[in-house]
Amino acid sequence: MTERRAARPWLDQRGGMLTGRRRLLLRSVIAVAALLATGCTPPGLPAPLSPEQTSGGSTGHSGVATVTATGQATAGSVTIGIDGPISGFNPYAVADFSPAERTVASLVLPSVSTVAADGTVGLDRRLVRSATVTDTNPFTVTYDLVRDAAWSDGTPVTAEDFRYLHEQLVAANGTVGAAPYASINEIRSQDAGKKVVVVFSAPVQDWLTMFSPLLPAHILKDAPGGFAGGLAGGVPVSAGPYRLDSVDRVTGLITLVRNDKFWGEQPGPQTVQLRVGTGAELVSALQRGDVQALLIRPNSAAADELATAVPADRRIDVPVPATVQLAFAGATATATANAPANATAPATATAPATDPAPATDPAAGSGTATRPGSLPAVRRAVAAGLSKEVITDALSGSRVDGMAEVTSMVRLPAEPGSATGAVDGSPGVFGDAATAAAELASAGYLVDGLYATKDGVPLRLSLGFATGDPRIAAAAKLIQQQLGRVGIEVDLLVDTPDGVVARLTTGQIDMALLTVPRGSSDAVAAASLFGCPVRDGVLASNLTGYCSTFVQPTLTAVLTGGGTVTSLDPQLWRDLPTIPLGQPAAVFAVAPELTSVLDGAGAGWLWTGPLSGVAGWPA
């Protein structure tokens, strides 16, 4: 196991992370009724999970039937334990991010590109025969799609799917990686839609990462809920090696079966079952042989049990491509540029930064920039009032390697080459009551006794977080308690995951505690999260509405292949449109018969996760 870990840049010496539809429905009803009547679960499975445990909100519209669990994996199938709430299955929605969503998307939806085990990005030849830059003025990319590529209902995968994804990503809020799509001027369809010509207004360095995955335009454009809600209950059609057969939120079982309409190589396991449960339940299930693999974020107790039950050569830490962030609605930028990129001194009590006067931001929700948290000084005061180590301990379930410290706004700590200390600047000031008081004073607040007040009105911020995740709830309560000690009152608001994102992007709350996913391109991730909104009333992937005249030119440059994205860190840490709290890590463990799966581990697992390769696992 020592040799295997040595080749993985995200692991340290301890192995941790550095940083007939009616008939189906009738059967479902009968099966669920039988389970309720007997008060038990099928033999050998974890106890049923309530909808509150498995979902952060309503199931929404879905073309997927709901059936009950069938028990242990049968011949030609594999059962995998995963944890975390299930909100939905849209890979481009921040609110839907979960192990279940990631796995289903990777096995069901087609992609232009794929990330290899070594971290390199290349074409997915199952969908695309070729993709080339065919013009530089204007910048144009032409995709030649595989002729046989079609959705499982017989509809071909065509330029219409490209066009639909582009239109949605530039018009919806709370999305992932939308920045390069804003540069698209036109998408042309040629050769019956099998040749796709994408014309950009400017070059995009990481164009190969775009359109990965594609969504079924012919389904979603007419589905109730559309882009935002059309995949809430599942993915009704497939253009991958598997199709989603059922999602049972009561028992926590998601079943994927071989897509017999898939034109590519057929997968090894004929059926893949994802069993949703708690870490402790799933570790026990692995010991019993009820599941053959686990991808979980265990708390300290479950991690200890897993370490005892599974030898080191059958488990590995895998970083999650996301950070847990405290995001602020209507975040404005400081009125002056930060010190040069090699500066290490943060804004402190003795030298508060100059903040802009509050003003309504037309790109964000009505009046979001008039909220107290829109001011950088207030955000810096919030950061200074937080004991980040205590919060990340709650977020990791007290597992030592469960949450890596974030030291850059634009790179993940698990990325190869990321530093362990500050990256091109200081990661702010945390846990310093004096700095908090000074920053509040610079924002016009008087800290006298228990409260910070302005014109006799106490400073009160609302904090939204999603249902279904006990660790996020615990962290939110800690934030409330810690900020109360520096005079900032916090009101907690619990909502569905998509409800929290909607409230944040429309300025109905001051702050939101969110897990924010991202893709493999630092430039795309930074430009998406911090780039100025390009349409009135649409924030796209920019959750806060942040727009800085000092940051935007560099973001524009790095998208086209110029500039250095890490040079933005000093200004972003000074402005703090979001406060990144940590990068989560999961543990992947397998039964003896799947030990060979770990041989394929590498830097690419940071972006794909191990379950994207299930089609190649032993049958």
Image (tube, grey):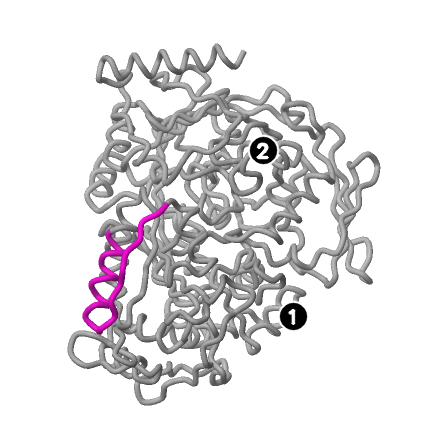
- Sort mark 1 into few (<14), some (14-19) or many (20+) by Cα contacts within 10 Å: few
Magenta span includes 466: no
- Which percent across, then down, holds residue 357? 46, 81
Q: Nearer the viewer, residue 455 or 217?
A: 455
Residue ID for mark 2: 223
Give the image quarter of residue 552.
bottom right
Q: Which mark is residue 184?
A: none
Q: Amino acid at mark 1?
A: Gly
- Which percent across, then down, holds residue 235? 53, 31
Residue for point 48% across, 50% down:
603
Q: Amino acid at mark 2?
A: Ala
Query: Which quarter of the rendered picture does the N terminus lie within?
Result: top left
Give the magenta part as a residue range: 474-495
Residue ID for mark 1: 562
Give the image quarter of residue 125.
top right
- Sort mark 2 into few (<14), some (14-19) or many (20+) by Cα contacts within 10 Å: some
Q: Nearer the viewer, residue 448 or 548?
A: 448
Residue for point 30% across, 41% down:
312
Magenta span includes 478: yes
Locate residue 114 relative to residue 444 in the image: left or right.
right
Q: Are marks 1 and 2 in contact (CB under 8 Å)?
A: no
Foreground tag (1 vs 2): 2
Q: Label 1, secondary structure: give it.
A: loop
